[in-house]
Image (cartoon, grey):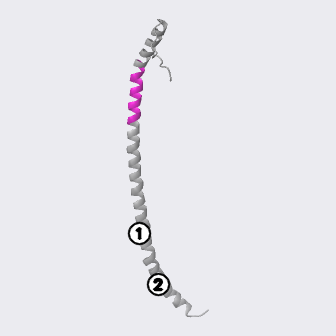
Amino acid sequence: MSPLIIPVLALLIPIVAIIGGIVVKPWFALQQRRMDIEATKVAEKAAQYATQTERLEERVRVLERIVTDRGVDLAQEIDALRDARHDGRSTAPSRLPIN
């Protein structure tokens, strides 16, 4: 082995470390920035989904209220139609000839 190899390695190791620090440190910073941007996008998307879900839940509540409130009236209308049919009265609309 050459006696020059030890001093060359002794100088080469700090040089590689310095160059690695110059290259790797900005690369890590770039990766961190990308992750921050992605996290912001995900948070915005989650907020949009939450808003959309809230709107849909409100619509479902309105529909449930319509169905349950209308259910009593509908039952009364069905009973009235049954009573009218049993009395002999027809509540069906008259049919027009198709010509």
Q: Which residue is mark 1?
A: 29
In the rendered image, the vertical position of residue 10 relative to residue 39, given as above or below:
below
96 displayed left or right of 58: right
Mark 2 or mark 1, which has the lower sequence index?
A: 2
At horizontal 44% and vertical 66% (from top left) the residue drawn is 31
**Is residue 61 on the magenta stretch?**
yes
* Residue in front for this viewpoint, 92 or 66: 92
Q: Tell me whether the residue at label 2 lies in contact with that at label 1, contact meaning CB atoms closer than 8 angstroms.
A: no
Name the residue type under label 2. Ile
Q: Secondary structure at mark 2?
A: helix
Mark 1: few/some/many CA within 10 Å (<14, 14-19, 20+): few
Principal secondary structure, stretch drawn in magenta: helix
Name the residue type under label 1. Ala
**Is residue 85 on the magenta stretch?**
no
User: Where residue 88 sits in the image (x, y, percent)?
Assistant: 48, 6
Label disc, if present, on residue 71 of the rendered structure: none
In the rendered image, the vertical position of residue 1 relative to residue 70, given as above or below:
below
At horizontal 47% and vertical 84% (from top left) the residue drawn is 15
| Magenta extent | 58-72
* Residue in front for this viewpoint, 55 or 85: 85
Q: Which residue is mark 2?
A: 15
User: Where residue 99 sits in the image (x, y, percent)?
Assistant: 50, 24
Residue at far bottom of view: 3
Residue at far top of view: 87
User: Where residue 47 sits in the image (x, y, percent)?
Assistant: 38, 48
